[in-house]
Structure formats: C-alpha cells, structure tokens
Image (cartoon, rainbow, N blue to C red):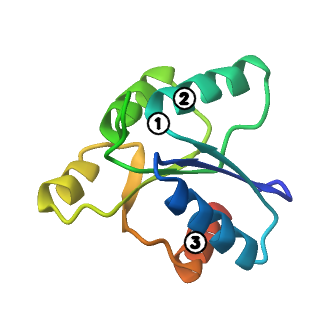
C-alpha cells in the first residue's frame, strides 16, 4: 500500500524535460514528492543517502538513457547491485527510437517498461495506479 505521498525520482540531464515532468506531476492531482537528478551517478548517490538515512525509497523511477557520467543502462546495473528488495517501479523514459533500446529494456528484471518521451499526464496516472497494486 502506498503512503499518502508518492515518491518519484526522475533521472534526466535535460532541464526542459525535468520542467515538463514537474508540470505534468502538478496536473495529476496526486500528492507527489518529485526529486530529479541529472545523471545516473547522482541518482545512485541519492539512493545510497536515502538508504543510509532510513528514508522512504522512491515508489517510481523514470530513467533517461543518454546522459553524461552514468547513462541509464549503467544506472540500472548499479541500481541492481544495491540489492533493494522493496518494490520500486523503474521505467526507461527516452526519446530513443531504436528498437534495440526498447528490447534491451526487457532484459532487465528490475525495469518494468519503456516509455517514449514526452511523458503524458494520462501515462503518469497509469503508472501511479499500477503502484497501488
């Protein structure tokens, strides 16, 4: 069961995409605590801090593929190495049109799916409803 507030982690190096997602979050009507990180390494560091401080993990993580420092695939590998047992829904959120990226998403048991940018209000609401099991 979800807490009253949904924790969302967005990993994307494009400030415009982050701004758009923030606006979409505001329009869902859900109480969402959104944290954004500009690359996978910042996100891994953030998750390590959350775990160390015994704070609630994100319920939902949206991951861009192409980013500097640590890309989306490298983030997923590092995330899996954290050994998090709590349910966290991970989705690749990308503008990639390459079929191999969509197929690669399926090779990770921790990744629930691939979403093409831009994220819509309706799609975010669907993801939130899935969190409610």
Q: Secondary structure at mark 2?
A: helix
Residue at numbered disc 1: 39
Q: Which mark is residue 124?
A: 3
Is residue 60 shown above or below 81? below
Tell me, yes or no, if residue 24 can be seen here.
yes
Q: Secondary structure at mark 3?
A: helix
**Left or right of 38 in this view: 47:** right
Crowding near pointer 1: few (<14 within 10 Å), some, many (20+)? many
Q: Residue at x 36, y 34 (%)?
A: 68
Crowding near pointer 3: few (<14 within 10 Å), some, many (20+)? some
47, 23: nearer the viewer: 23
128, 132: nearer the viewer: 128
Is residue 95 shown above or below 63? below
Give how far apart the Cα atoms at labels 1 and 2 are.
Answer: 6 Å
- Say which of marks 3 and 2 sits in front: 2
Residue 70 location, quadrant: top left
Give how far apart the Cα atoms at labels 3 and 2 are.
Answer: 23 Å
Give how far apart the Cα atoms at labels 3 and 1 are.
Answer: 21 Å
Residue at numbered disc 2: 42
Q: Secondary structure at mark 1?
A: loop
CB atoms at circles 1 and 2 under 8 Å apart?
A: yes
Crowding near pointer 2: few (<14 within 10 Å), some, many (20+)? some
Residue 1 location, quadrant: bottom right
């Amino acid at each position: 069961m979800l807490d009253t507030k949904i924790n969302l982690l967005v990993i994307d190096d494009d400030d415009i995409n982050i701004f758009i997602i923030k606006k979409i979050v505001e329009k869902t009507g859900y109480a969402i605590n959104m944290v954004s990180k500009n690359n996978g390494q910042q996100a891994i560091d953030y998750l390590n801090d959350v775990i160390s401080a015994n704070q609630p993990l994100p319920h939902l993580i949206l991951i861009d593929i192409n980013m500097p420092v640590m890309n989306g695939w490298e983030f997923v590998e590092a995330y899996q190495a954290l050994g998090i047992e709590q349910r966290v829904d991970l989705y690749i959120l990308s503008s990639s049109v390459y079929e191999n990226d969509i197929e690669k998403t399926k090779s990770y048991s921790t990744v629930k799916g691939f979403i093409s940018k831009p994220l819509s209000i309706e799609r975010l609401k669907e993801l939130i409803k899935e969190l409610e099991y």
